[in-house]
Amino acid sequence: DAGVIQSPRHEVTEMGQEVTLRCKPISGHDYLFWYRQTMMRGLELLIYFNNNVPIDDSGMPEDRFSAKMPNASFSTLKIQPSEPRDSAVYFCASSFSDRATGYTFGSGTRLTVV
Amino acid sequence: GENVEQHPSTLSVQEGDSAVIKCTYSDSASNYFPWYKQELGKRPQLIIDIRSNVGEKKDQRIAVTLNKTAKHFSLHITETQPEDSAVYFCAASGGGATNKLIFGTGTLLAVQP
C-alpha cells in the first residue's frame, strides 16, 4: 500500500483565491481525519469522517473551510476565500474503526497564502 | 472535550543520556495514548502506543508509562542518539467509541553528539 496520499505537496496562492487540498486514505481504512499544523497551535483536528460521513467538524475554523468525502478513497478540504492566516501544513490521516488506534498520516500539504 | 498538555516544549540532552517527556490529559474516558515522532519537514509517525488497561510498554530504547489515576503518561528514551532528534507529540483518544485523537503541543528534542 502506498500509504495516505495527499496532493499537492506545496501550494502558494494569493489571498482571496480558492484552495483545494486532496487526500486518498489507505484502502480499507474507514476513518479519515484532517489536521492543521502551525507553530503556534500545533496539530489541530479540523474534521473527521467515518464511512464517508462527517462526524465532528467542530474544529473547522470558520465557514470559509469545507470538507467532503464523496467516496471511501477520496476527500477534499477547501478554503474559499483563502487568507494569509490559513498558511500552515495540512495533514490528512486515516485509521481503522474497531477501536481507537494509531493513525497513518499523509505527507501533508504546505499552504502559503500571500 | 479532551485537553492534552505536554512538557517540556524543548529538551536538550547529551548523546547517551535519557530523555523523558510528560503529558497530562483531562478526559478520564480516554483509553488510548500514542506517541508520534516528526522529523523536520516530514509527517508524524507512530513510534509507540499504550492502552488504558496497561501501565507500561517498552520497545527497545523507548518506553511509555501510564498513570490512569493521575491522568498522565510519559515517554522515556534511553541511550539517546543524534537520530532521535525530532519533535515528539503525545496524544489521547477522545474517550468512548471515538477514534478522534487530541494532540499535545509537541516537544523538540535535541540530542547533542
Image (cartoon, coloured by chain):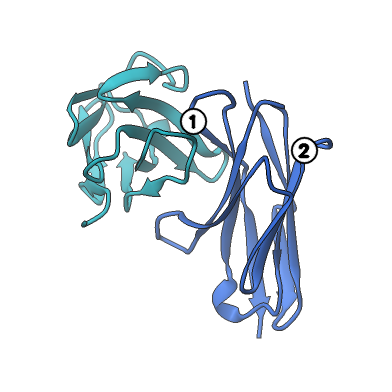
Q: Pointer 1: residues within 10 angstroms few (<14), some, or many (20+)?
A: many
Q: Name the residue rendered at 34%, 32% in the picture.
A: A31
Subunit of label 2: B
Front position among marks 2 and 1: 2
Q: Position of residue B103 (x, y in %)?
A: 57, 40
Q: Is residue A79 above or below residue A36?
A: above
Residue that mark 1 sits on: B100
In which quadrant of the rendered view does residue A88 lie? top left
Residue that mark 2 sits on: B68
At mark 2, the secondary structure is loop
Q: Which tag, 2 or 1, sits closer to the chain's start?
A: 2
Q: Pointer 2: residues within 10 angstroms few (<14), some, or many (20+)?
A: some
Q: Quadrant of the N terminus of chain A?
A: bottom left
Subunit of label 1: B
Q: CA distance from mark 2 to mark 1?
A: 19 Å
Q: Position of residue B99 (x, y in %)?
A: 47, 31
